[in-house]
Amino acid sequence: MANSHRVAVVTGGASGIGLGIARRLAEQGMAVVAADWSASACTAAAEDLAGCDAPTVVVEADIGTEAGAAEAVGTAVTRFGRIDLLCNNAAIHPIATIEEMDVEAWNEAFRVNVTGAFLCSRRALPHMKERQAGTIVNMGSVSGVSPYVGGGAYAVTKAALAMLTRVLALEAGPFGITVNCIAPGSIRHRTEAGGNTAHIPVGRGGAIDDVASLVIYLASEEAGYMTGATLVLDGGATAGRKRAGVAVERLPDQGGER
């Protein structure tokens, strides 16, 4: 059944960053389909999102398969008659060096992180093209630019996702569709999470709301001229290096507009 709401599909939307994005989008008045492969997470997410004013649907689906991608996107079209935003957020993060990584874990990372985004995008594009409008936001990572030992498979998939973003932007742009990639740095999934933030110029770790706010912007008319970009969201952590022993003095807050 069609309605007047703009409609979003968020993969990996039943927990962590994905759930936070789904909640914020619903609070902004978008109908949301949150897709996730975890049955228990889907049950909890359905309860969490039930209080939102905009309609929400939680779908148990493995978006790394043709059937799962079809279920995620098809639910939006069947229930709400359209899809305005696809947020390809679902990902897995195996930890092992390249020498230690087994091929099954390597292939699974690509199946979920890259193939899942490909399959969901391929399903969503015809509906967006029909309306000559739409937004795809792929969730990358600073690991795709600056990897670390043990996170090689994750880093390579996120680098691939940034390139998929550029290809999709070229192909979908003539149809009024924008495609961008967000590359978050250290994002605290739980409010109690801490960690060393000395390397982050803004002096704090990222929050899920920081990511959700950028998704909301990219899905807005104000971002209509932005496509094919990878936007690093890391508080400046990868901007460069601090010289040892050199501190930056923060100015006192003077109040007023900034």
Image: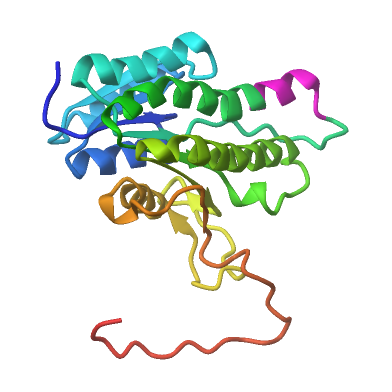
Q: Image quarter for residue 23?
A: top left
Residue 244 in view in this figure: yes
Residue 16 in view in this figure: no
Residue 173 coordinates in the image, percent (x, y): 43, 41
Say above or below: 22 vs 245: above
> Seen in the image, is 106 located left or right of residue 71?
right
In the rendered image, the residue lying farthest to the front is 174
Q: Quadrant of the N terminus?
A: top left
> Seen in the image, is 198 located left or right of residue 121?
right
In the rendered image, the residue lying farthest to the top is 67
> Seen in the image, is 156 located left or right of residue 47?
right
Q: Residue at x 43, y 90 (%)?
A: 251
Looking at the image, which is closer to me, 49 or 146? 146
Magenta: main secondary structure:
helix
Residue 12 coordinates in the image, percent (x, y): 44, 29
Residue 164 coordinates in the image, percent (x, y): 58, 36
Looking at the image, which is closer to me, 235 or 197? 235
Q: Quadrant of the C terminus?
A: bottom left
Q: Residue at x 38, y 54 (%)?
A: 225
Residue 84 coordinates in the image, percent (x, y): 29, 33
Query: How many numbered marks, from 0 up?
Result: 0
Q: What colour scheme does the image use? A: rainbow
Say above or below: 249 vs 91: below
Instruction: Tell me, yes or no, whether the highlighted magenta stretch contains residue 69.
Output: no
Q: Residue at x 35, y 41 (%)?
A: 21
Q: Residue at x 53, y 13 (%)?
A: 65
Instruction: Tell me, yes or no, whether the highlighted magenta stretch contains residue 105.
Output: yes
**Which region shows up in magenta?**
101-109
